[in-house]
Amino acid sequence: MDYNFKKIEKKWQAKWEKGKIYEVKENSKKEKFYCLIEFPYPSGEGLHVGHPRSYTALDIVARKHRMQGKNVLYPIGWDAFGLPAENYAIKTGIQPAIATAKNIKNFTRQLKSLGLSFDWSREINTTDPEYYKWTQWMFLQFFKHGLAYKDKIAINWCTKCKIGLANEEVVNGVCERCGGIVEKKTKEQWMIKITKYAERLLEGLEKVDYAPRIKDQQVNWIGKSEGTEVEFGIKNSELKIKVFTTRPDTLFGATYMVLAPEHEMVEKLKSKISNWVEVEKYIAKAKRKSDLERTELQKEKTGVELGGIKAINPVNNEEIPIWVADYVLTGYGTGAIMAVPAHDERDFAFAKKFDLLIREVISGGDISKGAFTEIDKGIMVNSEFLNGLKPSEAIEKMTAWLLEKKIGKKAVNYKLRDWVFSRQRYWGEPIPLIYCEKCGWVPVPEKDLPVELPKVKKYEPTETGESPLAAMEKWVKTKCPKCNGTARRETDTMPNWAGSSWYFMRYTDPKNKKEFANGKNLKYWMPVDWYNGGMEHTTLHLLYSRFWYKFLYDIGVIPKECGDEPYKKRTSHGLILGEGGEKMSKSRGNVVNPDDVVTRFGADTLRIYEMFMGPFDQAIPWDEKGVVGVYRFLERVWRLQEKVSGKNANREIEKILHQTVKKVGEDIEAMKFNTAVSQMMILMNAMSGEEKISPDVWKLFLRILAPFAPHLVEELWEKAGGKKSIHLEKWPEHDSKLVVEEEIDLVIQINGKVRDTVKARADIGEDDAKKFAIGSEKVKKWIEGKEIKKIIFVKGKLVNIVV
RNA sequence: GCCCGGGUGGUGAAAUGGUAUACACGCAAGACUUAAAAUCUUGUGACCGAAAGGUCGUGUGGGUUCGAGUCCCACCCCGGGCACCA
C-alpha cells in the first residue's frame, strides 16, 4: 500500500475541521498557552514558502503543548491594509477591498492545506470596520491623553507624479514608478509620542524572554545615551545654541559648531548671515537626501559656513565658526553639535576637508593621521583645569563645572524618534478627527465610530499631496461634534503598523462589539506566551506594539493581571532564500509556491522539510533536492507499519526511542527542529533494520512525530487502533534509565590528538582510565622515550596524555 | 556608515572548550530488474600510501589552553534592519 498523502491529508483536514479539535474556549480549570505568529499581509502573489516556516514551527510548539494538556490558543488573521493593494487599485481600478477579499480567500485555502492547527473561529481582519473601529478608538485614546500631536515632517515627494512616496518606493533618489526626481517636502503629520515611553520600553526588556539578538536590536534602536547639554552663545546676540554631548571632557577641543540644515537657528539668524544665498542653496540641496545618504561616513562631507556669525565656546570664550552641514541630523539630540575634530571621526573628516582647526585635547593618538577616539587611553591636554586628568575623570569635573556656571546640565538622549502616524493614502484606517475653525481638532465621538473608509473613484493621492479622501468633498465636509459648526474631517489615514499593534488582544475576544476585548478574556489569555516572527520586525512592529500595549495598560483598559508586556517570549525565524542564496522575488523569478510542493509531495513533507533544512533562526536557500529526502523519510515511516507486531521491544531500539523522545521534546522547546527531525530519522533507520517493531514502540514514535507530520501520523495512529485523534493524546515522557549509555568509546589523546579509542564502562574512574590509556599498544608508540608531563581525564569522555 | 546575525565536505548542515563533518542531498559501486525508475546494501573531507597508518583541514592572521569550529584580538566576505514595504 502506497503512501497516498493526497487522500490522507484531505481526509484528516476535513475531520479536524468538523470535529473542531483546534478551537478553544476560555477555561479557567486548564492552564492556558497562547502561541502567536505574525499574521500575514494577504498579498496578490499568495503564500510564500517563507510563511510556513514560522507557522509550522509554532504549530509544532502548539501541538506539543496541547498534547501536554494545555488549553492552546493558536490564532490567525489578516493584516490587510497596505500599499500593494492600493497600488494595484491605481493600476487596475479594482477596489482594494475587493482585491483584498480575493487574496484572503486564496491565502485561507493555502494555509488550510498545510494542516496548521489554527483556531479559525477567531479569524480577524484589520480592514474589517468592526476591527478598525477599535484601532480608531485606540488612536483617540492617544489623542485624548496628549500623545498624538501634529508636527512638520519631511516626506518623499515625487516631483513628477506629485505624490508622497514611501521610502521603499524611492529607488536611488528617483520615483520607482515614473523615474521622477524625489524631493523632501515638509508636511504636517500626526505623530505619536513613543519617545515618552523610551525608558519603559528599555526597562521592560529585562523582564521578558526575548532572543538576545532581538533585545540588542531594540536596545540599540532606543539608543539611550547619558551625557550633557551645553549652551553655546552667539557673538553679538542673545541667542544660544544647545548641543548634546557624551564627551564634555573634549570641550576645549571644540573648534567649530555644526547645525543641521533644518535647524531653527539658521532661519532665526538669517538677517545676520552674510552669505544667505549660498546657505539657502545648500539647505535646499540637503533636503533631497535621505538620512542614510547624509550620514554615510565614507561619502564626502559637504557643508557651508554661516558668514559673519561666530559662536562662543563657553569654556574658554573662544570665537568659533558655525557651519551648516547635512551630516548633522535634526532628529537626534538637539540638531546641533560642537565639533571636536581631534577626537571624532566625522568631525575630523569635515575639518580636514574645509581646513578647520584641529586641536588635540587628549594625548595618546596621532591627530595628524586621524581622530583619536579611544577613551581613557590618553591624558587631558590643552584643557586648562582638566589637564593631566583621565578623560573619564574630566567628564565628571567638566559636568560639575558646567552645572555650577549654569551653562550646562546632565541630559539623557535617545535615538528613538516619535512615530510618524499619518499617511496620505487611501487604503488605511481613517484618522477619526475633525477640524473645526473654532474648536481645533475634535475627536469623532465614540458612538460614531468606526469612521468608515468611503469608496472613492480615484486612488491616486491628490496633487497637493493629500490622500484621495481629500477629493471626496461630501465625506470631508461634516459638523463639529463640539459646536455643531461646519468642519472638515482629517483625510490622512493610519500606517499599516496601527492595526498590527494590538491584534493579538482581539484574538482573545474577536467578536466583541462593545469593547476591543473583554477584560475577563484578556486576563485569561494575556500575555502571549510565545511569539515568533521575522527579525525584520524587531525594531518597528515589535517595538510599536509593546508601546501600544503599555499605553493601554497605563490608561487602565488592560487588566493589571496581564502585566505591561504583551509578549512573554519572542523568537525569530530566518528568511528562506531562493536557490542559489538570493532573496526570493518576483523579479528574479525564483519564487517557490508552497502549493506546488503540497501537490507533489504533500503538506507533511513541506512542513518537515522546512524544519529540517537548517537552523530555524538562520537564512537558508531553498533546495528542491532536500525536499525529496524528507519525502523518502515519510515514505519509509509509512512502510514501517507493516513491521508492527506483538513482539516484545528490543532493548537497543527502546534506548534509541527514549533518547529520541527526550531530544525531540527538548529540541522543540529550543526551536532546534532540524536536529529533532534528524534524531527521528536515526530512530527510523534503526527500526527499519529490525524484523519486527513492537506496538508500544510504534505508538510512542507516532506521538513524537505527530506535531511534525500531523496527517500521516493521524492515519497511522488510526490504523494502529487509536480511538481518538492522536493530537489529543498525551505527549510522552522519556524513561531516564533508558537514555543513558552504559558503554562508551574512551578517547585517548596524546597532546590533544586522538591516537586510540577503547570501549569502556561509561562510569569508568580516573585511575582505570589512565591505566587503559598507558596500556594501549598504539599509545606506547607515541610515548616511547618521552617524558609524561601530565595526564588529563575527562569523565565519560577522554584521557589526554601530555608529553 | 551604524546596529544585529552568519562563514564548517561537492550541497543543506551537526557538534555543554574534549573523537570535526551526525542527519539529509548528491555522487560512485553493488543487489533486484529483460531494461529503466523506484527500493535496498556499501562507500564518500583533502593529500600520501597496496594496506596499516600518517599529514593537513571549520573565511584570513595572531593569541589563550593539556586541548579551540567553539573563548579573546585584528581583518575579509555574505545576509537582515536603518524609522512611509509588510
Image (cartoon, rainbow, N blue to C red):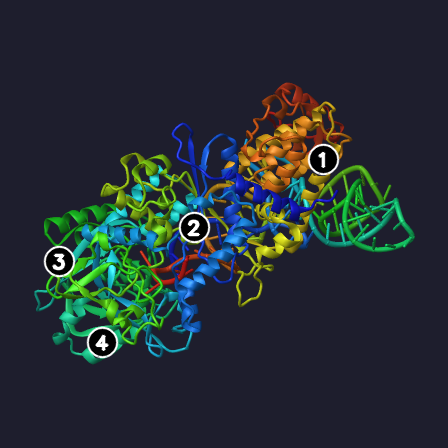
Q: Nearer the viewer, mark 3 or mark 2?
A: 3
In the displayed structure, would residue A456 be above or below residue A529? below
Residue A259 visible in this rendered orientation of the protein? yes
Amino acid type assigned to the residue bearing label 4 in the image: Val
**Residue A619 shows in this picture:** no
Residue of label 3 = A482
User: Of helix, strand and loop, which one carries label 2?
Assistant: strand
Callout 4: 10 Å neighbours few (<14), some, many (20+)?
many
**In the image, is B85 to the left or to the right of A493?**
right
List the residue tagged with mark 4. Answer: A279
Question: Dot 1 corresponds to which residue?
Answer: A641
Given the image, on which type of amino acid does mark 2 rest? Gly
Residues marked 1 and 4, same chain: yes
Residue A77, disc = 2
Residue under disc 3 on the same chain as residue under disc 2 = yes
Labels 1, 2: one chain: yes
Secondary structure under badge 4? helix
